[in-house]
DNA sequence: CTTGACCCTGTAGTTGCTACAGGGAGCATA
DNA sequence: TATGCTCCCTGTAGCAACTACAGGGTCAAG
């Protein structure tokens, strides 16, 4: 059994975030000490680690919730998990493509900037609606 | 002079968003008609177009605010603009790198998923804190 | 017995909008 | 003139996923 601070350290999670996860129902309300402190067992540690790892991989809290409920059921097949992961992957592919397009536009803009004063700044010009 | 709805159409911006920009001080409060409707001139159109284009390029509202104040001053040199753009670019590079790393992790995970039941799901396993 | 680190609840802030609710304005049509 | 209809107004609340207080209580060490 460990305190919320210890759990936070073990999972690299802020105390407020753990309480937040409890509030939104991702983590079950833990037992309390006589002094009303939360205490967490190994299962809670495992669950929070799962959540954090999923979040690190960019899954939304809703997706994490779905993954958790699938593991909680235990009997359900792997297909739903696979679909969630693939959907997420597709979204990441999209974001990468968007950012690469953005980078291209930005770098074109930046390269055209000579460093003079604002009246002839190519960046401002590039952002402006009319050609001067 | 045009209504807020017309300005919105011209800049592909929702009416609520325009009012929001006004509220946070990105757009000056425009003139009003007798019936208390906002009316916008060409300068407002140019300014909002600038904002939208900057936003499309991924600049934050704070960055847009900085860019706008530089153009408003007119005399300041281009270096600050350049720095803002380069900082933004660096951030995008970072995001791309992060997402590519993520994609790699995810694809490894997904490929290992056989499609059996949850107890042997490699995705769940990959997300779990302990080996089994 | 006091100091300091930790914990508690509850609420508000962050970013960049978006979505109402509950009304008023302005124009066309019957 | 009445009735729709579309647009506009203000003000407030909601979204994601936390984060940051304020204003207190608990607990172990010295």
Image (cartoon, coloured by chain):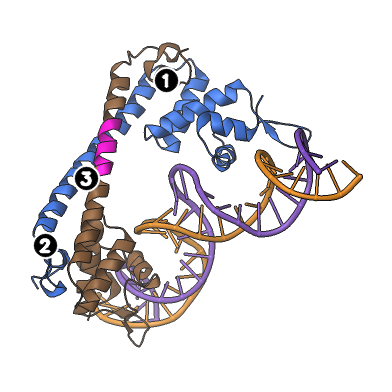
Chain colours: A brown, B blue, C purple, D orange
Q: Which residue is mark 3?
A: B99
> Residue A61 in the image: x percent, y percent?
32, 62
Observer-nearest of C29 and A62:
C29
> Residue D18 in the image: x percent, y percent?
35, 59
Q: In the rendering, which numbered label is found on residue B113?
A: 2
Q: Which of label 2 and label 3 is nearer to you?
A: 2
Q: Which residue is mark 1?
A: A124
Q: Is A56 rendered above or below residue A100?
A: below
- Cα–Cα gap, marks 1 and 3: 29 Å
User: Magenta-highlighted stretch: main secondary structure?
Assistant: helix
Q: Is B87 rendered above or below residue B114?
A: above
Q: Are marks 2 and 3 on the same chain?
A: yes
Query: In the displayed structure, does residue B57 sit left or right of residue A90?
Result: right
Q: Which of label 1 and label 3 is nearer to you?
A: 3
| Disc 2 + disc 3, Cβ < 8 Å | no
Observer-nearest of B89 and A39:
B89
- Cα–Cα gap, marks 2 and 3: 21 Å
Observer-nearest of A107 and A80:
A80
Element type where label 2 sits in the image: loop
Q: Which of label 1 and label 2 is nearer to you?
A: 2
* Marked residue chain, label 2: B
> Residue B130 in the image: x percent, y percent?
11, 70
* Marked residue chain, label 3: B
Magenta residues (range):
A94-102
Name which residue lies at 40% across and 15% down.
A121
């Amino acid at each position: 059994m460990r305190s919320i601070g210890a759990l936070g350290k073990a999972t690299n999670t802020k105390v407020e975030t753990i309480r937040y996860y409890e509030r939104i129902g991702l983590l079950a309300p833990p037992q309390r000490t006589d002094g009303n402190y939360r205490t967490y067992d190994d299962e809670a540690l495992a669950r929070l680690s799962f959540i954090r790892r999923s979040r690190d991989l960019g899954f939304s809290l809703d997706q994490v919730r779905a993954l958790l409920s699938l593991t909680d059921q235990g009997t359900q097949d792997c297909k739903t998990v696979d679909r969630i992961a693939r959907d997420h992957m597709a979204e990441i592919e999209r974001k990468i493509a968007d950012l690469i397009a953005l980078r291209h536009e930005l770098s074109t803009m930046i390269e055209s900037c000579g460093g003079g004063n604002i009246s002839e700044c190519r960046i401002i010009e590039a952002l402006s609606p009319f050609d001067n």
